[in-house]
Image (cartoon, rainbow, N blue to C red):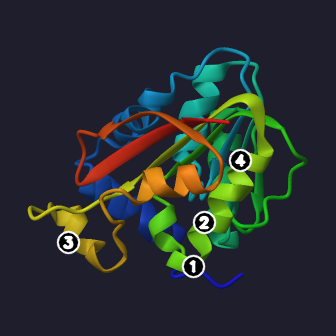
Amino acid sequence: MKTSSVIRQAIAYDALTWILTLGRERRFREQLIAPVSLRIGESVLDVGCGTGTLALVAKRRVGDGAVAGIDASAEMIERARSKATRAGLQLQFEVASADALPFPDRSFDVVLCTVALHHLRRSMRAAAVAEMRRVVKPSGRVLLADFVFGKKRTIAGLLHHHVGMKADELGQLADGAGLRVVDTGRLRFWDLRYVVAHR
């Protein structure tokens, strides 16, 4: 897979995230997934899961529900598996491309893609969201959240200005994949916006 950027330095990534969130990464991840309202027993896929922190938060929300995560970086997946083992939680982490998800059609109640689409080439983003639609159940939900820039930018926004999303791009990606947007808004952290869409 060719992406805009595949992060190999997993420990450095976690350290930078800790700094940018002022040591509140878990709270940051909880706010990222809040718009999709995860429920006990739901099956969840985290696309572009990085080192697995958000997938672990999701697992704690869904209890006995199955949670999986994919990332293009083997180093990120290795660290995610290690985190899950240390936490004593059962999750499935796989090295995979966002535009070729290794799961059957209609596998998940919820698909999450948070702060990950900007790592993909613009030409690849539509294919990735189409794959998310393929693997979500007919009654399922998809959450897209990423950097969307206005005139005022935070430090995190400035670090990502070269790959930021256009203001209406998240909704357009969802629409283009055949998803129905039901909610959109701005998140408290940084220059982040979200879209919740149903299949």
Between the C-alphas of marks 2 and 4, the distance is 11 Å
Tell me where residue 133 appears, x and y as whole percent: 71, 47
Q: Give the mark, 4 or 1, whose residue is nearer the N terminus.
A: 1
Q: Nearer the viewer, mark 2 or mark 3?
A: 2
Which is more N-terminal, label 4 or label 2? 2
Residue carrying label 2: 126
The answer to whether residue 79 is left or right of residue 137 is left
Label 1 sits on what residue type? Ser
In the depicted view, which residue is nearer to us: 165 or 81? 165
Classify 10 Å Cα crowding around label 4: few (below 14), some (14-19), many (20 and above).
many
Element carrying mark 2: helix
For the residue pair 111 and 175, the one nearer the viewer reads as 175
In the picture, residue 135 is in which quadrant?
Answer: top right
The span from disc 2 to disc 1 (Cα, nearest Å) is 7 Å
Q: CA distance from mark 1 to mark 3?
A: 22 Å
Q: Label 1 belongs to which residue? A: 123
Nearer to us: label 1 or label 3: 1
**2 and 1 marks in contact (CB < 8 Å):** yes
Secondary structure under the numbered disc 1 in the rendered image: helix
Q: Amino acid at mark 3?
A: Leu
Residue 107: quadrant of the picture: top right
Instruction: Name the residue at the top extreme.
Output: 40
**Dot 1 or dot 3, earlier in sequence:** 1
- Residue 170 image offset from top left, x and y in percent: 44, 54
Q: CA distance from mark 4 to mark 3?
A: 31 Å
Q: Amino acid at mark 2?
A: Ala
* Residue 71 visible in this rendered orientation of the protein: yes
Q: Residue at x 50, y 76 (%)?
A: 122
- Decide which of 41, 138 is in the foreground and name it: 138
State the residue position of label 4.
133
Quote the CA–CA distance across marks 2 and 3. 24 Å
